[in-house]
Amino acid sequence: MGNGSCLKVVIYSIREGSCPGWNIWTDSTRYALPALRFKTCRLLSGNVRNRELTIIQRRILRRLRNKMRSIKRKIYPRKNLNSYIQSQTTRKLPLFHGDLPITEMHRGTEQTSYIPFPLNPETRSDVIPVRLHFCETIPQARQPISHRRVCVNNGMVSITHLKVSHGDLISFQENDARIRGEEIRRSFYKEISVEKIIGKFLNHPVRMWRRTKTEWFHLLKTKRGCRLLLKSRFLQQLRSSMQEEDLERTKKFGSEKVCLGSSFAEHNRMKRNLYHFKSLFLSKRRNEKNRNLPYPTSSPIGDNSDLYSNSTYFSASPHQFTKKRRIKRIELPTHYSEVNHRTLKAVVSYGPNIGHIPHDIRLKDLNLLLRSGNGRNVVFQLLLAGSERRRASRAQETGKPGPRTLKGGGEASRTSEDGVPNARGRVLGGSSAINAGRSIILRKVRGELGPPSVNQSYEWVERAIVFRPELQNWQSAVRDGLLEAGVDPYNGFTLDHSVGTKIGGSTFDSSGRRHSAADLLSYAKASNIRVAVYASVERILLASSSPYSGSKQSAIGVVFRDQTGRYHHAMVREKGEVMLCAGALGSPQLLLLSGIGPRPYLSSWGIPVAHHLPYVGQFLYDNPRNGISIVPPMPLEHSLIQVVGITNSGAYLEAASNVIPFASPARSVFIRNPASPLYLTVATLMEKITGPLSAGSLRLASTDVRVNPIVRFNYFSNPGDVERCVNGTRKIGDVLRSRSMEDFKFREWFGGRDFRYVGPA
C-alpha cells in the first residue's frame, strides 16, 4: 500500500514537472524525500527540435521571422542614431503637451546645385553656402560647420542640418574668409581678366604683356602672377575704361536688377560687377554725391583690412563687437534681394543701411519713448501691419456705426477657443483707433514705475488726446442711478481708477472726432521717425556679442515683409533697441516665432530655440464683460463709455448707447420689395470684473505670423471670478430699480411700467 502510493506520487510529479520536495504519507509514518531534477533528452524521437516541419509550418515561421525583423528595424535603426533619438522624442512629446503638430524637416535627394532656390524648401545651414556658390559641394560646406567655423546670427553652430529662416545671417570666421577670399580673387582673374581683358588689349600699342594668354592663365593661379598683375599700371587704366562702359550702359538701358543667389556662377557676364564691391576688391567707397563720375583709378585689390570691411553685399551691415579684437566675417544672405548691378546697394524700402550693435528686447509703451525722444536725436522706426489712419476714417466719428463695421484692413477679427469674438486694430494707432475711447490712468501704480519722467509722460498723453465728455440723457441717468444704488462717493471727472462713481476721460473731443495714439506722432520730430505701413514683422533677429556658445543673446533687428510679400531688414543703430509693442497677442506670438519660449514646444514646431523661457504664451488674462440692453421709449444720443461706477465687490459698471440695425422677422410672401432697414436706439448697462483670477494661454496656429494664434482665456474657470460677476450683475439690477431709470420704462396695459429688453430675458 505504501509502495503503491509512493509510485503514484512519482508518476504525478514527472507528469507535472514539480521540483519541490516530496511529502509522502503512509498509514502511520511521514517521510521527506529530496527534490529531483530532470534534464530534457534531445535524442528522443518525440522532441520538437528534431522533428521535420511541414510546408505550411515553414511558411508560418518565415512570416514570423520577417515580422520580427521589421519590428526591430523600426525600433532600432541601424543607419543613424540621431533618427532613433528624434523618433523617441517625437513619441514622447504628445504625452507632455497633447496633440501638437510636429513639423519634420525635408531632406532633398537630388543634387542641390541644380535645384532652383525659390522652389526648394531646403533651408539648411549646409545647403545655403552651396546654393549661393560660396562652396562647391555640400561636404565642403559641412566641414567648416562641424569645426565650428560658421556662425548663424553671429553665434557658433556645429549642426550641419540646422534649419535657417529668411533673414538669418550666415557668416564665416576670419581665417576661412581669408582662404575663401584668395580663391575668389584667383577665380576673378582667371575667368574675367584672362579671357576678356587680355584678349581685348593684346593688340594695344603700349603693350606690357610679354606672355601669351595660356601662360597668363596658369601664372595667375599663383600669388606671383597676382603680384605681377597688380604692379602694372595697365590694370588701373583698364578698370577705368570698364566702369565708363558700365555708366554708358546704365544710362542707356536703366538700372538693371539681378539676383544675388543666381548670379554667383551662372552669369559670367555679371561676375565682374558682383565682385566689384568694397568687401572684396575696393579700398575706398565711392562718394555718394558723385554717382555719375567713374571710380578713382586705384588698385582693385586692397589690403586685408579693406578686404573684410563692414560693407558686404547684404542689405544691412554685419555685426560689430565691442571687444578690441573684432571677428571679421563674410556674410551670406538667406533670401533673394534685388540689387543694382552698378552700385551693388540693396533695394530695401525700409530699414537703415547702417552699422549696429546688439541690444535687448524691450517691452515698452511707444508713447513714453516719443515723449522722451522729443528733444534728443533718436530715430524711431515703426512697423505697422495695417493701413494709414486716413484709410479708416469711418472709425473717427462717434455719430457713425461702431468700429465693428470696419472691414478690409481696419481691424483683424478673431474668435478665441472659448467662442468669444474680439478685434485688433490694423490701422495707424492700433486698437486705440477702434475701441470705445475710454481712458483711465492707475496713478498709484504709475507712481511706482520709475523716475518722475514717467509721470510727466503720462500727463503729456492726457493733455494731448484725453478730453472731458459732456454727459447727456442716458449717461446722466446712469450716474444718478449708480449713486442711488450705493456706488459712492461721487468723484466727479477724474482719470483715477478709485472706488466710487466718476466721469472718465474720453479720446473723443467735443466735436465727436477720435484722437488715437497716432496723433502723438505729430509731437515728434519728423526727421527722427520713420513709419512703414503694411509691414508685417516676421521675427526678431537675435545675435550674441561673443562667439562662444551659451553667451547672452540680444536683439539686433527685425525681419519684416511688405504688402507684396518681399522680405526686408530693419537693424538697430549703436545703443539702439528693438521695442516690442505688438499687443497682448502679437508680442508672445513674435517671441515664439523668434525662438524665445518653451524649448519642448518650439522644438515640436521645428523653430530653433534662441532662449528657453517656459512662460511665454502663458498667464493670458482678459476680463469678461456682461451686460443688459434695453430699448428706451425715446431716441437717445450716441454715447460710449463715459460714466463708470467702481464697486467694492470686485466689479465696475459702465454704460453706452448706440443706434444699431434691427433684424426684422421674415416678411410676408405677398410683399415682394424688401422693407427699409429699421434702426433702433439701444441703451446698455455692462459690468466687468477686476483682475481677473482666471488665466489662459496662447499657442501658435502656424509658423506664418499672418495667421492668428490660438487663444484660450478660460473665462470663469476660477470661482472668484464667478462671484464677482454675480455681484456686478446684482448691482446692475439695483441701478435699474432706481428712480432715475423710470423715464426709460414703457407703460404696460394695466398701468404698470417695465423695461423692453433686447436679447434673451
Image (spheres, grey):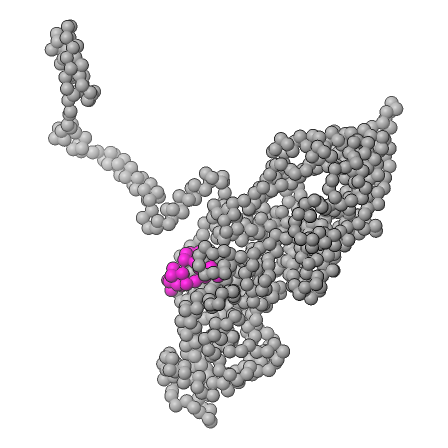
For the C terminus, which image quadrant?
top right
User: Is residue 757 something that shows in the picture?
Assistant: no
> What's the magenta region?
138-162
Which residue occupies the extreme bottom position in the image? 205
Vertically, is 364 above or below 735? below
Q: Is residue 498 left or right of residue 255?
A: right
Position in image of residue 646 (x %, y %): 74, 37
Q: Which one is in front, 389 or 487?
A: 487
Position in image of residue 360 (x %, y %): 56, 56
Indicate whether residue 143 is drawn in magenta: yes
Q: Write the residue at 64% across / 55% down.
A: 385
Position in image of residue 30 (x %, y %): 16, 10
Vertically, is 747 above or below 178? above
Vertically, is 607 above or below 152? above
Indicate whether residue 521 is drawn in magenta: no
- Quadrant hosting residue 92: top left
Which residue occupies the extreme top position in the image? 27
